[in-house]
Amino acid sequence: MIEKRNSHRIRLSTKSILSHDEVTLTGQLENISMNGALIRLEHGTYLPQGSEFDLTVFINDESTPLQLDVEVVCVSFAMAGVKFVSYKADTEGRLAQLMEALSSDPEPARVEHEIKRRRLAGNLREE
């Protein structure tokens, strides 16, 4: 896929599920950032760009998966690049901790998480 990312990513190969209405697709997460992920799907799977799904990411040694709402931003062969639209439950904090723990340079993940936290706090004050 063409490199359009501006977020720090970590390689994380783990089971993931994309679901929407009656559609459920099992895939393999390839990498993840605070803003999006790359998912390998079964060969021949087509996801329309702009389509929205619930993404469930199963992390080894954790009983509760990460849960996010995502939008498909690019598709190539059996790969789908998704951006995170919203986090469910405590996923954002858990993802930030995972990024810091698995990154060879955890500082970019900390900075991105702080920027998102401040943006969210600002949005809450405006409402």
Image (cartoon, rainbow, N blue to C red):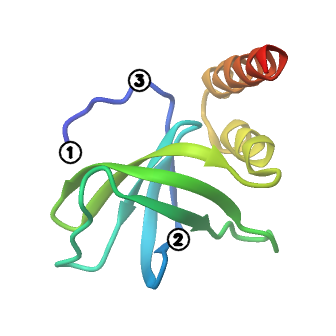
Left or right, residue 112 beside residue 10? right
- Residue drawn where x is 75% and y is 51% of the image: 91
For the residues marked 1 and 2, what is the alpha-carbon distance in whole angstroms?
19 Å
Name which residue type carries label 3. Asn
Left or right, residue 116 beside residue 9? right
Q: Secondary structure at mark 1?
A: loop
- Residue drawn where x is 53% and y is 44% of the image: 84
The residue that label 1 is drawn on is: 1
- Tell me: residue 24, above or below residue 103: below
- Residue drawn where x is 78% and y is 71% of the image: 61
- Residue drawn where x is 70% and y is 18% of the image: 119
The 10 Å Cα crowd at callout 1, few under 14, some 14 to 19, many 20 or more, is: few
The residue that label 3 is drawn on is: 6
Q: Residue furthest front?
A: 127
Q: In the rendering, at what x and y percent does residue 43 appear?
A: 20, 78
The residue that label 2 is drawn on is: 16
Q: Secondary structure at mark 3?
A: loop
> For residue 59, which numbered disc appears in the image?
none
Name which residue type carries label 2. Ser
Looking at the image, tell me whether mark 3 or mark 1 is earlier in sequence order: 1
Q: In the rendering, at what x and y percent does residue 126 appear?
A: 77, 14
Looking at the image, tell me whether mark 2 or mark 3 is earlier in sequence order: 3
Name which residue type carries label 1. Met
For the residues marked 2 and 3, what is the alpha-carbon distance in whole angstroms?
23 Å
Q: In the figure, residue 103 lies in which quadrant?
A: top right
Looking at the image, tell me whether mark 1 or mark 2 is earlier in sequence order: 1
57 or 52, nearer to the observer: 52
**Quadrant of the image for the N terminus?**
top left
Q: In the rendering, at what x and y percent does residue 86 appear?
A: 62, 45
41 or 47, nearer to the observer: 47
Left or right, residue 26 beside residue 89? left
Q: In the figure, residue 24 lies in which quadrant?
A: bottom left
